[in-house]
Amino acid sequence: MKIYPSLRLLWAALVVSAVTSLGSLFPESSVSLAASILNLAAYGVMLYVLHRLSEESARFSRAFSCQLISLILSILALACTFMGTSDMMLSFMVLLMVTGSLFSLISQYHMYWALDERVIPCGYAYPARRIRWCFYTPLIGAVAASFLQTLFYQDLAALVVQLVCQLAPLVLLWQYLRAVKNREDDPLHI
């Protein structure tokens, strides 16, 4: 099965997700809410892509399952914002958001490892294990940004580090996309 069209759609959803994460920089609740809704739509597209790819490998299947749980929990957390602002409701919303983020992280782990497992057997002109950095870089950026904020009170530097570490996976995945497209467009490739 050719996976380039699915991966192109996945890349577009990740771009939308990265751009909407900038919505958290604005203190207005309407901008933040719109960014959250757009981000949920991007995660819905990712869920669709993972569903299409779930027959390709067990890792894609696990990524799909975790992404589905993450999306459901994120929708429930968003729904909690409309149900009131009691302390119990806010605690429940935070619990839903953290759990949804954890499942999203597990989904990304399985997805990037599934993509890496295809590099050698499919003959992509892409270095093995490089796509895994799409998983590592945002984690490293989050830790570095937290370190900068808590120890040095450098909010702007922390923001720059996080943005750079969110853009790195987009570049790496774009390079992977090019390698997949070149291989799938090769007339000698069956």
Image: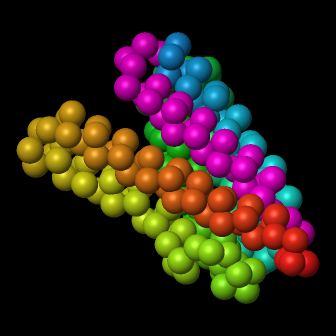
190 with respect to 111 (left or right): right
- Quarter of the picture holding the C terminus: bottom right
The colour scheme used here is rainbow
Q: Name the residue rendered at 59%, 54% in the picture.
A: 174
Query: Residue 9 at what x, y percent from top left?
Result: 74, 46
Q: Nearer the viewer, residue 44 or 164?
A: 164
Q: Main secondary structure of the magenta part?
A: helix
- Quarter of the picture holding the N terminus: bottom right
**Res. 103 in view:** no
Q: Is residue 17 magenta?
A: yes
178 with respect to 153 (left or right): right
Numbered label tally? 0
**Res. 136 in view:** yes
Q: Nearer the viewer, residue 58 or 97?
A: 58
Q: Is residue 122 magenta?
A: no
Q: Nearer the viewer, residue 136 or 126?
A: 126
Which residue occupies the extreme left position in the image? 152
Query: Residue 189 at what x, y percent from top left?
Result: 85, 77
Q: Name the residue rendered at 12%, 39% in the picture.
A: 153
Query: Residue 127 at what x, y percent from top left?
Result: 53, 77
Q: Nearer the viewer, residue 101 or 99?
A: 101
Q: Answer above or below: position of 7 versus 87.
A: below
What is the span of residues highlighted in magenta in the rendered image?
1-29
Q: Name the residue rendered at 75%, 80% in the picture.
A: 122
156 with respect to 111 (left or right): left
Q: Answer above or below: position of 46 versus 65.
A: above
Q: Name the residue rendered at 66%, 85% in the picture.
A: 120
